[in-house]
Structures are given as C-alpha cells and as structure tokens.
Amino acid sequence: MTEMVYGTVPVQSGDPVLPRWWRTIDKWTMSCILMLFGVGLLLGLAASPPLAAKNGFEPFHYVQRQMFFGGLAMIAMLITSMMQPSLVRRLAVMAFGVSLVAVMLLPFFGTDFGKGAVRWYSLGFASLQPSEFLKPAFVVTAAWMMAASQDLNGPPGKSISFMFCTFIVVLLALQPDFGQACLVLFGWGVMWFVAGAPLGLLICLAGVVVLAGAVAYNNSEHFARRIDGFLSPDVDPTTQLGYATNAIREGGFFGVGVGEGQVKQSLPDAHTDFIIAVAAEEYGLFLVLVIIGLYATIVIRSLYRLTRERDPFIRLAGTGLACTFGIQAMVNMGVAVRLLPAKGMTLPFVSYGGSSIIAGGIAVGMLLAFTRTRPQGEIGDILLRRGH
Amino acid sequence: MIRTPLRPLARILKARDRGENPQAIERENLRLRHENMRDQARLRAESRLFVLGVFFLGAFLAVGGRMGVLANSDPLEPRSSVIGADILSTRADIVDRRGRILAKNLDTHSLYAQPHTMIDPEGAAQKLAQIFPDLDADALLEDFTGKRKFLWIKKKLSPEQKQAVHDIGEPGLLFGPREMRLYPNGAIAAHVLGGASFGREGVSSAEVIGVAGVEKHFDDYLRDPANGHKPLQLSLDLTVQAAAEEVLHGGMKIMNAKGASSVLMDIHTGEIISVVSLPDFDPNNRPRPLTAADKDKDQSDSPLFNRAIQGVYELGSTFKIFTAAQAVDLRLVNPSTVIETKGPMKVGGRTIGEFQNKNYGPLSVEDIIVKSSNRGTGRLALQIGVKRQKEFLDSLGFFQPTPIEMVEASGGRPLLPARWTDLSAVTISYGHGLSSSPMHLAAGYASLLNGGTRVEPTLLKQDGPQNGPRIVSPQTSQAAVKMLRKVVTDGTASFGEVPGYQVGGKTGTADKPKPRGGYYEDKVIATFATVFPASDPKYVLIVTLDEPEIIGLGKKRRTAGWTAVPVTSQMISRIAPLMGLRPVVEPATLTGVTLTSQ
C-alpha cells in the first residue's frame, strides 16, 4: 500500500560508492603513496630554500607550491581511483589523443625555459609538461590494444601499440628527453612481456643488446670511457655525483640532523634529481630505507594483486603503470648511488615538480582503480571444478 | 594441430532442424574458447608478474644495500669549494754566498671586490680612487654597478693602504692574503735574480712564480714545499756585486758608453762572484719586456737584456792569448820564440792589418801578446791549423751556450763562422769572426789560467774546485799568466795596474758589426779580460764597455786600453779587498823603493 501511495522506495543497485571504494581499494598502496607525498614535503622543506633564495622567493616558496600541486594531485588520485576500469580506459584513451597532439605541437608552441630542450608549455603561473601526462595515458591505451589483440578475431593490437610507442619515443628523443623516452619504451616492454611475448624472441633481444653493447665498448672510445668512468670506484668529488655520494657518506645511518645538511647548497638539482642525497645527508640511511621500502611496497603489492586479475586489460594496464612508477624511482636512486649511469629522472611524488606530481597522482589513481578488489569468478572455478 | 571449429557442422544442422539460431552456438563456443584462453593467459601472466616482482625487489634491495654500504663508508676528505684553495704561495728565499738575503717572500694582501655585496658602490669607488691615485673612480663605479660579481682591484697592498681601505668600511671590499716577492737590494744583481710575478691567483692565496733569471730556472725547486724553505744559496757576493755595479756604472758614465758588463769568476770553483749588466732594472718592479710593437727598438738595448750572458760580441784581441797558449801547449813555439809580423800578410785574399797600420817587425810570442799583434797571432793560428783551433775553442766551451743556471743562458749561443777557413782561423785568432758572450770569455780564461783544467761557470755556491778535464799543461797555463801579466806591466793595459794585486790581462777592442754586414768605423766593444793575482791566479774579471768614447791626450780614444782598462783597475782595487785578497808586494817592484818611516 505504501508503495502504491508514495511510490517505490528508490533502490540502489550494489552498495554506496564510498564504502565500496574503501572496501575494495588497496589501502596499503594508498597509504604508502600518501606517506611518500609527506616525505616529499619534508624533504622540500630542507632542499628547496637555497633554490628559493637564489631565485629571490620566500624561503618556502617551493614547498608551498608543492603543497598546492600535491593537494591537487591527491584529489586527482582519489577521484581517479573511484572510477570503474572501463571509465578509466575511456578517459585515458581520450587523454592519450590530446596529450599526443600536445607533444607533437611542442616545437611550435612550447618553451625550453633556457634549458635547451623544448618540453614545456608555459601557462604563466605554472608550466605544463605534456609528456608527463602522455606516459600513463599511453600505458593504458597500449594495454587496451594488447588486451584486444588477445581476443579471437581481435585487431593486431601489439603491433599497433608498438608503432605508437616507437612514434612517441622518437618524438621524445627529438626534444630531447631520453629519460621519458626510455620510460615509455620500458612501460611498453613490460606490458608486452606480461601479455605473453615469446620467450625465444626475448632471449634473442637480450643477446642482441649484449652483443651491441660489447661491440660499442670495443669500438667506440667515447662509449668505453663513459662506461669505464662509471665502473671506476673513484668519483670526482666536484661533480654532482661526487657531491651526492659524499652527502650519503656524510649522513651515515641517522643523518647529520635536520637542516644541517650541506649538499643542498652545492647541488643545483638538490630538490629534483638528487633529493635522495638530501634525504640521506639530513636523515641518514634510515629515511632512505623507508623511502625505498615505500616504493617497493607500492610496486610489489600492486604486481601481486594483479596476478589474481583475470581481465587482461586491467592486468596489463596495472602492470605498465606500476612498473613505470617503480622504475622511475629506482633509476633516480640508482643514479645517486652510482648503480646506474647519470640520467636526469625525478623521484615520483618526492621530487619537486608541478605537472609531474599531478600526472603522477592521476597515474597512481589509475593504478589504484585497477588494483581494487573485484570479483574474479573464483566461485565459478570452484563450481566448475566440482562439476568435472 | 587439431583445429576445433567454432561452428561444428553437426550441431548447426541439428539446430537448424530445430529452428534455433545457429549464431548462438558460435557465440557459445567463442565464449568458452575465450574463457579458456583467459585462464591460460592468466597463468602465464602470473609467472611473468612474479618475475617482474622479483626483479623490482632485487633492484630495490640493491639500491638499498648500496646506500647502506655508502652510508657506512667514510666521507672523502672534505674539499673546500673555494677556487684556488690548493694554491701554494710559498717560495724559498734566495741568499748570497754569505747568507745575505737577495730575494724573500713577504706577507701582503690583495684587494678585491664583490660588487653585489656592496652597500655604497659610489662612495667606495671615490674613496678607493683617493687612496690609490692610479685608479679611476668612474671606471671603478662602472665595475661596481655592472654585472660582475667579482673583480681584482690591487694585487699588492702596503699595510697603510690596507688600513685605509679597511677604514672605508665597505663590506664588498675584501682582502685576499698572499705572499709577494721582495728584492730588498733593489737593482743589485737584478739580471741574475730576474723577478717574479703571480701565477694562478685565488682569493686565499696566489702562486708566486719566477719570470726570469734564477727565479725562473729554479722555479720548481723554490716552490717545492718538500725543500722545507731551505734557501737557495747563490755564489754571488752581495758586497762585491754592489761594488762592481757602482764602479761599472761610474765607468760607463765617464766613458760615455751605452752599456757595460762585468763578470767576476773564481777560476778554480767556477763560481760567479759577481755578474753585472748595465743598464739594469729593479726586479721589484720589472719593466715591460719589448713586444712586437717595439720592433724598431734593439732588443739588446732593453734594460732586461743581460749583456754578460745573452749578449754575444766579437771580443777582439782578448782571444789572442788562446792562440798563443795553444801554440805553446802544442810545443810549436815557446814564449820567447820570435815570429815575423811584418806586412803585408794575405790570407784567403784578404789583407791582415795591424791596429793603426803599425808594423812591429819580428816579435817574440810574448811580445805579440804584449803589443797585440794581429799578424803575429794570425801566423801562430796558421801553424796550429783550423782543426786543432776548433777543437781547442770547443774544449774551452766556445761552441755551446754557457751552462750557467739562468733561463737566459740558452740565448747566449755563440756565433761561429759557417765555413771555418784559414781566413776564419786567422781572424778568430785575434777575436773577430766568432761572437761569444763575456761569460764565455770568463769561462775560457778561467779554464786556461787555473792550471789548465776545464771549469764551467756556475751561480750556485760550490764546496771545492771543479776538477774538469785537462785542456793545457800547467806549464802552459803558467806561461799564459806570465804573458798576461806582462801586458799590464809593459803593454797595452798599463792603466790596469793595481798596486799589490798583480793584475794580468789582455785588452780587446773590436769594431761593432753593422746589422747589415760590415763594421762601424766609430763604434767598438772594448773588453779587458784580467786575471789576478798573477803569482797565484784566483779570479778572472771580464769588463766590457759598449761604444765607449773618451778624450785622452787630446784625441778621441775608444781602445780598451783607454776605456775598459781603467774601469777594471778601479773595480779590482775596490773588490779585491772585499774578497779578502791581501795585497802582495812584488819582489820586482821592491827595487828602487826605499822603505822609510814616515
């Protein structure tokens, strides 16, 4: 009767958005990301005042900016993580188109800020680096194509995505921005690997790389000198790497103390590429291990959750996002400890940078959206097995 | 490979019979196939994701481990980032043979500015211009208000200047501690010491580097901290050097010469006791060297030019003693052998003349030296022959630059005839056709007169005599000294007698060569090469005057006998007592002297 009089009670299908989000989100990964952002602000307090003083700003100018952009990034991350994977895919493919066009138009409308590489659009109050957005969007798009190719009668998605990948790598290398180019290539390679690249081909590729490296080492003096310089245990203490290495040594296990570090005065990239050296000097090995632990947790936990994922698109996209995120952190820290040759790459969420932190927020938001717990049809498996 | 059809014909036909849609069968099969593939792909992806996870875990562990190793290792020696902190400004002293200071480092300060830290650039510029009259206030202000963040203003400040700058109270004006080179004796021994200037300069110190002379030759030694500030001891005697310079300067003025040089050498040890070249300069304020812009000026007239070592001249009749000594040593003649010196004498198509076209007739070898006969030595040279003459002069060091420890020494390369003909042998026998430096002549005389062993000139204090290879027999050496002594007592150098010091020597007056060939009529190099005391030769002194001219007995005189000889005798009378030589009374002069109480 009541219904006939007052109409039906609106019924919601499924449970409300927020509780479901909270129930299914990977809380470990999310808290690690929030902690990383906090660490970034803490280190920004230490590393950026010399730069601010040099550029004539308030001492904590860069910290305030980082807080503002970081806040935006956190909001973007939360919103993205609440979306359904299909919505994420749709938006990401659109974003891929837009950012690809933006990257292609860089030579005409971009600016280089006097750094020799045209990577940015100047927006007045901030600068925008479209390749930062292109990277996660490409990963999702490529995952979509690869997943489609796995269907019977599907399109040749692997080849198409590889063509896109090559095109983007060439575009980025022309800027030149070899760091981003390598990241894009690495992301595609990881997805290709997980999507089932033939093992024989992989072994052949590895052999070719080793062979090419050996030939280059033996024939190119320049290349050999760089490798030897990297392998030699001595480091010139007046180079950026030398300062970074010395800062890590100065810091020891528990650091020289908050605000006592010196490396931020001598390193021009202390707030971006070498922020881990600032962390090591002021807070010691302790904080460095915490940071490494946070990154490792994010990457490995995401990969672990993806192993249970049945949907090939979600699996591939999640793998690509998690691995690009992890490799970026690893390369940045590997350079500072001279495990890897010098390459300018920022530490995600910790290094200072406006558009990079927002793009990073969107990327981990997508990752969180893909790693949410969802029904994987396990019960079907059980029932089918019983039925056999 | 077994291909399973998506549309199995049997089922399709059955379905058609039943009137069902056969597409549903295909879709059903497709779905099942996909699910099957998906499970397979998931299993494969599971293992590959596991590989990726292990890779990342390993990579992060490696980074963390490496961080741990680094954090556990000791930091490198902290290096100051101040540029030039590694610059060593130390430089050892230079002292004379008795330990008196010739060159020393002195603490001073440089003045530099950091305009971006200045409070009142205008006031600073004006006050600086008041303190340093050579600075221009407008130029300073331009520098202080421009883009530069750093500029040097003064390289050396006196303590008073430093205090005055300090009193300006400008925080952008800063002092850089450094050491400067000081030559407390001014121009004395200027050419030997050379001079010093700043090399690499930093804010906290600056290198002091030698630019010439022994300062440059011994630069590495002087700057080497491993030597522990041990001073460099030279063979020079400061007082002798000062006296020699004073006398030579006076002589140069009286004789209206444009330049002069003297070399005093110990004939046994080879030590240079004094070497003078005039005009000279103050090494504390070294004059600008001649550059390409001054190419019309003669390099050898610059005060920086060291006439005693760099200057090569035809030294004239001073060479005759070499010819005579060699002839005696070869036993071709003895000092009393009589040689015909009558003209005319033609060698290689050229007539050999005498000074003022004199004709001496037959002369003993000794008299050839005493009267300085060109034809006499020429005939001796012909007897000796080209080959033996070359060997002899080579053994005396006339073919190489002197080995003296100065950077300029290599510039004093002797000029030798391109083809050494009989004519060359004859002209060289009386000092024409071969140019050498006064230092060469001193070394040659010392080697000939010290008993006949080769001695090389050195500027470092020696402990004992150099026992070089034998050149002539001791008897020849003695005979040569005797001949030279006779030149002073009876010959062309009668003004050279210094009572009690038994001076022996040989004059030389050589016409100066024109730059484009031929000789000047009225420009000479007058040289007097002496050895003293003759009874026990100890020192050789070479005095050279460049273009001297004096009125003597109503005539213009340019010969060494009238110019270089009196200067030399004056010099010996000054320096011999300084060197501790006691005057000896020669037995020969005793006769006729009545010793009475006065």
Image: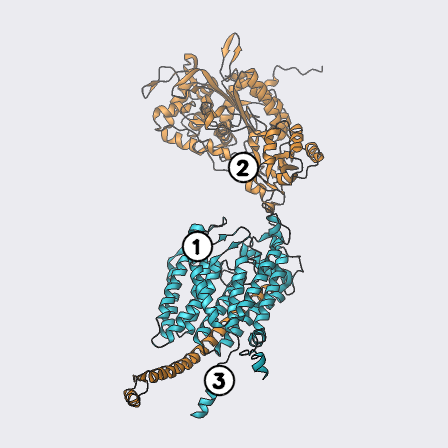
Q: Which residue lies under the disc numbered 2?
A: B216
Indicate which disc residue A378 carries: 3
**Residue at the location (50% across, 10% down)?**
B556
Q: Position of residue A26 (x, y in %)?
A: 56, 74
Q: Position of residue A198 (x, y in %)?
A: 37, 74
Q: Are marks 2 and 1 on the same chain?
A: no
Q: Amino acid at mark 1?
A: Pro
Q: CA distance from mark 1 to mark 3?
A: 48 Å
Q: Which residue lies under the disc numbered 1?
A: A176
Near-viewer residue (A234 or B321): A234
Near-viewer residue (A101 or A193): A101
Near-viewer residue (B192 or B363): B192
Q: Amino acid at mark 3?
A: Glu
Q: Where does the C terminus of chain A fall, quadrant-wise? A: bottom left
Chain shown cyan: that is A
Q: Position of residue B258 (x, y in %)?
A: 52, 19
What color does chain B have in the rendering?
orange
Residue A264 in sight from this viewpoint: yes
